């Protein structure tokens, strides 16, 4: 299944797969990964896990979220 850009809410910061509107995603809990201008989101916990060694977090963790619905629906 592939999504075009209009059907995607965002994209994974590791594998670049689209995250659909209303779809699940995970977010790093470390504050430096979630600043106003830099929001690191991942399509699966596996992609978050791949991100973790690059940033060498002391207390790594993630939270599960659901992307917002498509505007106008």
Image: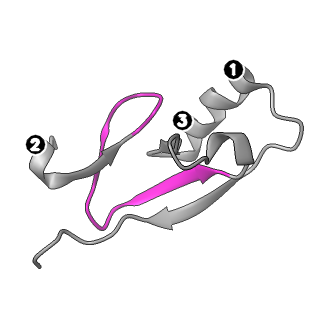
- Mark pair 1, 3: CA separation: 12 Å
Image x and y of residue 52, in percent: 70, 31
Task: Choose between 57 and 37: the one closer to the eye.
Answer: 37
Q: Residues within 10 Å of mark 2 (few under 14, many from 20)?
A: few
Give the farthest residue toward the bottom. 73
**Residue found at x 61% / y 28%:** 50
Image x and y of residue 46, in percent: 57, 38
Lower position in the chain sequence, tag 1 or tag 3: 3
Give the farthest residue toward the front. 36
**Residue found at x 58% / y 45%:** 45
Q: Is disc 2 placed on a helix, strand or loop?
A: loop
Lower position in the chain sequence, tag 2 or tag 3: 2
Q: Which residues are magenta?
A: 12-28
Q: Which mark is residue 54?
A: 1
Give the farthest residue toward the top. 54
Q: Is disc 1 placed on a helix, strand or loop?
A: helix
Magenta includes 23?
yes
Q: How is the image coloured?
A: one colour
Q: Nearer the viewer, mark 1 or mark 3?
A: 1
**Residue found at x 62% / y 29%:** 51
**Residue found at x 70% / y 40%:** 32
Quadrant of the drawing holding the N terminus: top left
Q: Quadrant of residue 72?
A: bottom left
Magenta includes 27?
yes
State yes or no: discs 2 and 3 in contact (Cβ < 8 Å): no
- Mark pair 2, 1: CA separation: 29 Å
Residue hosting label 3? 47
Would you place residue 32 above or below residue 63 in this image? above
Would you place residue 47 above or below residue 19 in this image? above
Residue hosting label 2? 4
56 sits to left or right of 67: right
Image x and y of residue 62, in percent: 67, 53
């Amino acid at each position: 299944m592939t999504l075009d850009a209009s059907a995607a809410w965002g994209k994974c910061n590791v594998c670049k797969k689209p995250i659909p509107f209303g779809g699940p995603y995970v977010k790093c809990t470390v504050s430096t990964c979630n600043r106003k201008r830099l929001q690191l989101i991942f399509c699966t916990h596996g992609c978050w896990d791949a991100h973790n060694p690059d940033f060498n977090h002391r207390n790594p963790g993630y939270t599960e979220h659901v992307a917002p619905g498509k505007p106008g629906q």
